[in-house]
Image: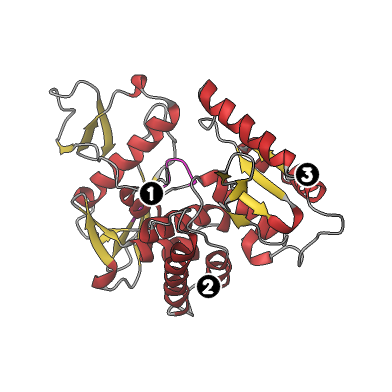
Amino acid sequence: MDRYPQPPHLPVVVMSNRTPTAMSHPVRLMRGLYTDLDLSALKSWQVRRELSLARCTAAPWRFRSARCLSHESAALVHGLTVRSQEPDVSIVVRSRPSPTTQRLPAVAGGRQDVRVRRRVLSVPEEDITVVSGLAVTNLLRTAVDCAFDLPAHESVCVIDSALRALTRPDRYRRLSSDRRVAVAVRALQAAVEAQPGRRGARRARAVVAIASAWAESPGESVLRWFVSALGLPAPVPQMGIEVEETMEVFFPDLAWPEAHAYLEFDGELKYRDERSLWREKRRRDALARMGWRCLHVTWADLRDQRGLRTRLLALLPPGTSGGGRVRDLWR
């Protein structure tokens, strides 16, 4: 079943001059702002996520000059994928403050140097929307801002999930889905070109050019970024491959149909039970009988970029090199 981004439930934040006694597990987010969060009952990734959402909720109360949340903060409120765990909080203001950043209170179990970034950006009113009671940049503008201001390997996650939320592609209706995606990508490209003097324009163009609404996880997005940044031939995301003997259709994360090769990104939760493992074995065996070769990739593999490059070249036909490293995607 296809999964699409959905706005998350936001933690309750209260204003108080002192630690609220009514809270079972009070956490100080900013000066005079608290949330009730039992950090001991959560996994580390859940702690970072809940703290980030609570800070996004608190920021407009603390900084009254804020017009809206932007960048990763807007992405989190929309429910988009954000690669950086517990990112800084970004708010749009009308005039440049001094200082532009402010360090937030450290929380045990979370990142110790989170800051609020007050950004002076020209954001038209039509680019601002309200999600769960918070003013945020809309999906398209959020993707564009991240394309300009984040490293490509981080912004690609936000852009992919924004496209996914905007177009809701259905892999069983590929042609109509691809048409919707193409329209959304053109809108992204036009929004980037509408800010030609903005710093990061070359990087923004490069990452929007490889954007895809078919990525279902941040690992898939970062893996596709790496393949593209190396200049290798562009793989097809979530391409349906039918097994004749059973009439089943499998959808590898990234595939090169001409080379009969595909990539699968394996996150920590992908094979969380025996049923998932068995389903993956059946798929891999069926595709292998049809002559398809596979490379499974993890986050550890992505950190070893030299080793992963060697394995990718071994998977593809001899002499495959593409057009060489794409410099703007490494920025």
Image position, residue 44 (x, y; %) = 44, 28
Residues marked 1 and 2 touching at CB (< 8 Å): no
Label of residue 311 in the image: 3
> What is the span of residues highlighted in magenta in the rendered image?
83-90
Q: Secondary structure at mark 1?
A: loop
**Direction from residue 154 to residue 111 in the image, left or right:** left
Q: Amino acid at mark 1?
A: Tyr
Decide if residue 99 is in sight here. Answer: no
Which of the two discs, 2 and 3, sits closer to the camera?
3
Q: Quadrant of the C terminus?
A: bottom right
**Direction from residue 317 to residue 133 in the image, left or right:** left
Label of residue 4 in the image: 1
Cα distance between the residues tagged 1 and 2 = 28 Å
Which of the two discs, 1 and 2, sits closer to the camera?
1
Figure check: 77 above or below 275: below
Q: Quadrant of the N terminus?
A: top left
Q: Secondary structure at mark 3?
A: helix
Residues marked 3 and 1 touching at CB (< 8 Å): no
Dominant SS in magenta: loop
Residues marked 2 and 3 touching at CB (< 8 Å): no
Image position, residue 187 (x, y; %) = 42, 73
Q: Amino acid at mark 3?
A: Arg
Which of the two discs, 3 and 1, sits closer to the camera?
1
Q: Is residue 218 magenta?
A: no
Figure check: 243 above or below 21: below
Label of residue 179 in the image: none
- Is the residue marked by circle 3 packed among few (<14), some (14-19), or many (20+) residues within 10 Å? some
Give the colour scheme of this rendering: secondary structure
* Count of numbered marks: 3
Residue marked by disc 2: 201
Q: Amino acid at mark 2?
A: Ala
Residue 319 found in image quarter: bottom right
